[in-house]
Image (cartoon, rainbow, N blue to C red):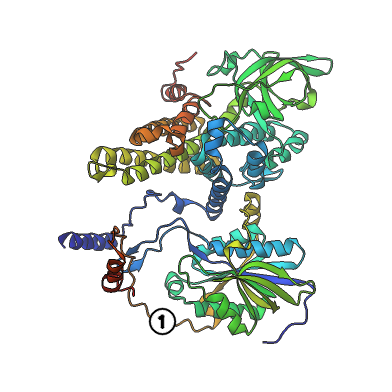
Amino acid sequence: MLRRTLPSSMRAVVGVKHAVDYTIKVQVKGGQVVKDVRHSMNPFDEIAMEAAVQLKEKGIVSEVVAVTIGNAKAVECVRVAMSLGADRSVHVVGDQTAIDNLETLQVAKIFAKLHEELQGDIYLMGKQAIDDDQCHTPQMLAGLLNIPQGTFAAGLTVADDKSSVTVQREVDDGHQTVNVSLPAVVSCDLRLNTPRFPNIRNIMKAKKMPVNTMKIEDLGIDLTPRTATLEISAPEARKGGGKVADVDELINKLKNEAKAI
Amino acid sequence: MLRAAARNTLRQVRAKSGYADYDLNDPLRITESLQEEEVMVMNAAKSFCDATLRPVVQDWWRNEKFDKEAVFGGLGDAGLMGPTIDGYGCPGTTSVAAGLISREIEKVDSSFRSAWSVQSSLVMHPIYTYGNEEQRERWLPGLAQGKLVGCFGLTEPNSGSDPGSMTTRAVEKDGHYLLNGQKMWITSAPIADVMVVWAKLDGVIRGFVLERGMEGLETPKIEGKMSLRASPTGMIHMTDVKVPKENLLPNAKGLSGPFGCLSSARYGIAWGALGAAESCFHRAREYTMDRTQFGRPLAANQLIQNKLADMTTEISVGLASCLQAGRMKDEGKLSVEAISMLKRYSTGKAIRIAREARDMLGGNGIVDEYDVIRHALNLESVITYEGTYDVHALILGRAITGIQSFK
């Protein structure tokens, strides 16, 4: 993938997923997850949108493009993105079966395909979607495009000459700061910012803004799933706890009943 | 084993016959009938309410606090004021979207929804509908942004249900108007910058826009309220208040002026009251499912289930009617009597539901931490203002029989 010359103005591409709403208690019925429930923008993607809009407000980014991949209803997600400050949007649409079968590798491939035209300087996405919690797409996209990644961003600073971005990452044992050259993929974590709520005036304006709709089957990407789902079941209902008399009994229970050690 | 088999059969039968599963939060799937823009507006309103209003409501209601900048400024920033007005910094969205905003705000508290209703339907609406272009430009943008707070002065100590008997008078003198009189039970009066006051000028009711700072204009707060405590309510005392000619609303003459505003507000209240009822229903359900007495949850009792069934039925049927009314309103097909019907229905059912929820929560139902008592007390005002429950019955009675029973 050819590097562009240093851009004087940057384009931020934000991936926003129309995910199951965080207030919904997911249920399993007949071996399938009940999907006919309220959906809204993945909260981590809201954080990514906020990061992009803040960069635009600072004059670092001159254009924000929001991208969603989903069923017909997912267009709501990019409309919200535009009401938050995206200048234009792309809706890759597929029927429910195609969307249900999508795996993170194919999602990353779709973004890689869109990069041919979008030429994003920075790709911003939530670190994971709250419905499937895969946490793969940003990393895979970086791999496919052969560009660097700064994941789990809790802090983000673009260099003055726009040649690189410093990402403060939240890792298990603390913070790690990396500096990666642009273009790059950055995945956003909870503490990066507090997203603004959409203003209704802007929602009305966003109604009239253009959405570039593309059919998923027209992108020329092999959408065959690489994995097969064997079984879906709900977690077991929580049972009451019990008291143990001493450490020996505890070890015995952990070893022989819970099979945890 | 047999029960599992029966459940599977039921599932297959449902699937074949094309029936969907029951949705506790939206039994009649109102959301399916909403336009994309309306869903977005509803979600935006909900985010705003959860982030800004919900965290403070318990403290503010208990202690009669109100932060004008946080509430009006916040509502303005979110673009929630005057939702159906086109231009002047307003969104220009549908009546259904306006109703959804009302419902989301009142899910938190009727005090906030009253403040929003007054600003949008009783101040911005008359200025937009009855004012000239200069008046619209002058006040609407500030009101839309929440930088200006408005109030609506119609009711007086001795004229509530009978606004035609008002004694506030305007006389023309030396090129301006002089207003004298008293208005009472005015939401936001103590903090208002802009006041739409209705007074008789040469025997005809006209609308005047008064502004904070005019000499002779006082807005004392009404103390001792046990309802709508998170919204300041007051009086408007006018002693020879000099109102310039530019502040007279040219296109409102007679009672049709204030009534046009009231119909718009009542429509919003029909949605809003059901929001309060929804909060009470969910609270009652949650509580009765958690609390166990005599070895089982309260929700296992038939009396409780009957009450929950009544609550959700009344709410769902009410919301479906409000949706229909909203669509008709935008097509110009909604009658004011239909609005009376729905305001009466929603407020009547909501107060019953709130009181019943209070009962179901037992002792916990009387503390503000559990919300329901706050809703029940607020609804005492909501069922009274903008036309009492009984007066709306008489409005309908007149429409049904042609005979006016109140004169």
Q: Name the foreground residue: B46 vs A209.
A: B46
Kind of residue at disc 1: Thr
Instruction: Answer with the quarter of the image where residue B134 lies.
Output: top right
Numbered label tally: 1
Residue A208 seen in the current view? no
Q: Which quarter of the image is occupied by the N terminus of chain A?
A: bottom right
Q: In this view, does B312 lie to the left or right of B106?
A: left
- The residue shown at (72%, 27%) is B249
**Which chain does the residue under circle 1 lie in?**
A
Classify B113 as above or below A99.
above
> Would you place residue B143 above or below residue A55 in this image?
above
Badge 1 local density, few (<14 within 10 Å), some, or many (20+)?
A: few
**Which residue carries the number 1 mark?**
A227
Quick check: can you spot residue B56?
yes
Q: Is mark 1 on a helix, strand or loop?
A: loop
Compared to residue A11, the image places residue B201 above or below, namely: above
Which is more toward the observer, A141 or B382? A141
x%, y% of residue B401?
A: 41, 22
In the displayed image of the protein, which residue is found farthest to the left? B2
